[in-house]
Amino acid sequence: MNNSNINQGHNKAILQKSETLNGYSAFIDKVREFDRELGDLAAALKKAVEYCIDRNILKKFLKLHSSEVINMLFTEWKDEEALEYRFEEGRNESRNESARNMLRDKVPPAKIAQYTGLSIETIQDLARTTGTKTS
């Protein structure tokens, strides 16, 4: 078990020792909840700030610094999404390269699809772009 997890429902003893840490944990939990509900991170951040201020969670801090908090978290979450996108892009390119290599070795498209998870259509497109004939 990771003892540094401060998400809601984890390490209650740590959260009980620090009102600020507990408030931050509650705030982030609300951001995630509102993001799932609204599907809009910027709106979720604003709603979480309002929610916490209304319930005296980090109220003084959020009243003074809410715009900085929203900007920082929005940027941080967007950076995380960009990294995930780049990872997925790299994974897809790796699968495509594996498929190209298998096509050159005359592996049947159905087997390539089985091994790579790519669709037959994608494999056929790759075959066209590499000038490889499929059977």
Image: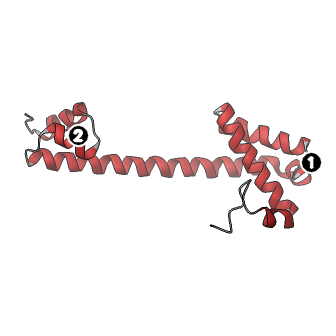
Q: Which residue is mark 1?
A: 56
Tag 1 secondary structure: loop
Q: Residue 73: which disc? A: none
Percent position of residue 114, x then y: 23, 42
Tell me which amino acid carries mark 1.
Answer: Asn
Residue at 71% across / 37% down in the picture? 34
Q: Is residue 131 above or below residue 19?
A: above
Percent position of residue 11, x then y: 74, 63
Residue at 68% across / 44% down in the picture? 32
Q: Is residue 118 above or below residue 63?
A: above
Q: Nearer the viewer, residue 62 or 94?
A: 94
The quadrant of the image that shows the C terminus is: top left
Q: Is the C-beta separation of discs 2 and 1 under 8 Å?
A: no
Percent position of residue 128, x then y: 15, 34
Residue at 22% across / 33% down in the picture? 120
Distance Cα–Cα, label 2 vs label 1: 55 Å
Left or right: 135, with 101 as reference point = left
Q: Residue furthest front?
A: 1
Q: Which residue is mark 2?
A: 113
Percent position of residue 74, x then y: 66, 46
Q: Is residue 52 visible?
A: yes
Q: Is residue 68 visible?
A: no
Q: Is residue 10 above or below residue 124?
A: below
Q: Is residue 38 above or below residue 60?
A: above
Q: Nearer the viewer, residue 83 or 55?
A: 55
The quadrant of the image that shows the N terminus is: bottom right
User: Which tag, 2 or 1, sits closer to the chain's start?
Assistant: 1
Left or right: 20, with 11 as reference point = right
Label 1: how many Cα within 10 Å (few below 14, some 14–19, many 20+): few
Which color mode does the image show?
A: secondary structure
Picture quadrant where residue 53 is located: top right
Tell me which amino acid carries mark 2.
Answer: Ala
